[in-house]
Image: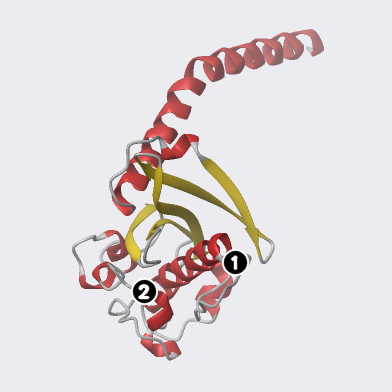
Amino acid sequence: MLLSLGVICLVCSALLAVVYQFTKDPIDAATVAKTNKAIAEVVPAFDNVPSEEVSEVELDGTSYKVYTAKSAGQVVGYAVESSAVGFGGPINVMVGFDAATGAIYNTSVISHSETPGLGAKITDAAGHFREQFLGLNPRTFSLKVKKDGGDIDAITASTISSRAFTSAVAAAYNVFLSLNSGETDAESGASKPAETVADNQNNEEESNE
């Protein structure tokens, strides 16, 4: 019996190794393509490959990936990967900044687990919620939902999702500021990435999100 189990384990391990080798490259390629697509959506036109010019910035104990977009050798924008805990789990976003003005060029949702029809509306690029961030300069705008005393209109019945998205954008802006001047000033009332989904649900004040 021990010999049989040993042989089965060895065969299964070998099969897993083979499958991993065959799927690793396609998975890596798909991940890079997804990242490049998100970058292209959030920064001005560029002619370099930002995913190959990535750096990591640590801020308040959290590491962020920053992609530099260039045109004719000049930096035109930065794309920052950021995240915060929403109603259903982590919300990962890409936030792009115009290098010249510091304004938010655009945002893109990389992944999320929010409620369809409610918090999932954060993915609607043409919706009012996401449009509020277009061309916004956080130096003159409070990156918090109005319920927390800020200037952002939350998605109806989806305060937690809206708050998390806004928090991720605020964190990305602080990363952008640290790149340029070493300062940070954007705040938000959202949950920090270290908090759990259960914490968010226990603290929920609205009937849905």
- The image shows residue 79, relative to residue 51, as above or below, that is below
Q: Bin the neighbour count of mark 2 within 10 Å (Cα to Cα): few under 14, some 14-19, many 20 and up.
A: some
Q: Nearer the viewer, residue 43 or 99?
A: 99
Q: Label 1 amino acid?
A: Thr
Residue at 52 percent across and 79 percent down: it is: 187
Q: Relative to residue 176, is residue 12 depicted above or below? A: above
| Residue 99 on image: x %, y % | 40, 58
SS for callout 1:
loop
**In which quadrant of the rendered view does residue 12 lie?**
top right
Residue sitting nearer the eye, 122 or 184: 184
In the picture, the disc for residue 196 is: 1
**On the rendered image, what quadrant is the C terminus found in?**
bottom left
| Classed neighbour count for the residue bearing mark 1: other residues with Cα under 10 Å, few (<14), some (14–19), many (≥20) | some
Q: Which residue lies furthest to the right in this view?
A: 2
Which is more N-terminal, label 2 or label 1?
A: 2
| Image quarter of the N terminus | top right
Q: Which amino acid lies under the numbered mark 2 shown in the image of this protein?
A: Asn
* Position in image of residue 146 (x %, y %): 37, 88
Direction left: furthest residue: 126
Location of mark 2 (residue): 137
Q: Residue 70 carries which label?
A: none
